[in-house]
Image (spheres, rainbow, N blue to C red):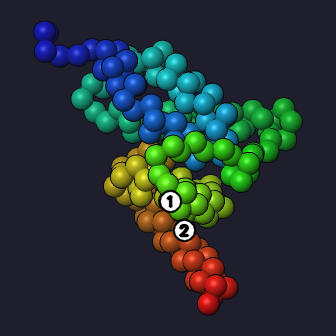
């Protein structure tokens, strides 16, 4: 009893260190820093409200990502009903990054724009596997899809990004 954390305690203590990852995932989902702020905060609030459903000792980050995805999908459905929806383009998103130098920032922005231009399903798979480090199986569980679908989305994304890179190189050469 003394060494074990309750589900609420584990969720509450895990939110702060996982928040940057959650926010980045929300940014990828929404394409807007402001909306990512709202979605990540809504996810934290929902996590605290639903903490009794979390199993202590399991992957809290995965649980939060899945929750954020479901909240976002519900928001999209509601927006489509209310006003037809619409998302901010990644070019309009301001991403603060004080650490890297100018060249790194330019390269990072170019890569982020190319990833942001991918279809949502591919973009989310890329971020979960390549940025967040989830295995294909874990990403499939978060997205509630088969592992083969994750692999297919990643292959399609790599192909598109590679084609774009080759197009850019041929323009320079």
Q: Residue furthest left?
A: 2
Pointer 2 residue: 157
Q: Residue at x 61, y 35 (%)?
A: 36
* Left or right: 12 in relation to 103: left
Quarter holding the C terminus is bottom right
Please report the residue visible at 38 percent of the width from the left and 36 percent of the height from the top.
61
Q: Position of residue 91 (x, y in %)?
A: 71, 53
Q: Residue at x 13, y 9 (%)?
A: 2
Q: Quadrant of the N terminus?
A: top left
Q: Quadrant of residue 163?
A: bottom right
Q: Is residue 104 above or below residue 76?
A: below
Judge whether residue 144 can be spotted in this image. Answer: no
Q: Is disc 2 placed on a helix, strand or loop?
A: helix
Badge 2 crowding class, 10 Å Cα cut-off, few under 14, some 14 to 19, many 20 or more, is many
On residue 149, which mark appears?
Answer: none
Is residue 160 something one can see in this rendering? yes
Residue found 24% across the figure and 29% down from its top: 57
163 to 49, vertically: above or below = below
Q: Find residue 104 and name its label.
A: 1
Kindly report the distance in space between the C-alpha atoms of the residues bearing marks 2 and 1: 22 Å
């Amino acid at each position: 009893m003394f060494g074990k954390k309750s589900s609420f305690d584990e969720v509450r203590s895990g939110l702060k260190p996982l928040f940057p990852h959650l926010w980045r995932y929300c940014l990828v989902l929404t394409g807007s820093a402001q909306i990512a702020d709202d979605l990540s905060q809504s996810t934290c609030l929902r996590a605290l409200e639903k903490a009794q459903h979390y199993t202590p000792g399991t992957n809290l980050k995965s649980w939060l990502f899945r929750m954020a995805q479901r909240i976002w999908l519900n928001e999209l459905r509601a927006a489509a009903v209310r006003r037809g929806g619409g998302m901010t383009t990644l070019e309009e998103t301001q991403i603060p990054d004080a650490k890297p130098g100018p060249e790194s920032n330019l390269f990072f922005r170019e890569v982020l724009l190319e990833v942001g231009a991918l279809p949502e399903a591919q973009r989310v798979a890329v971020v979960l596997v390549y940025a967040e480090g989830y295995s294909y199986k874990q990403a499939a569980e978060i997205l509630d899809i088969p592992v083969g679908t994750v692999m297919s989305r990643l292959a399609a994304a790599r192909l598109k990004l590679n084609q774009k890179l080759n197009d850019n190189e041929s323009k320079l050469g």
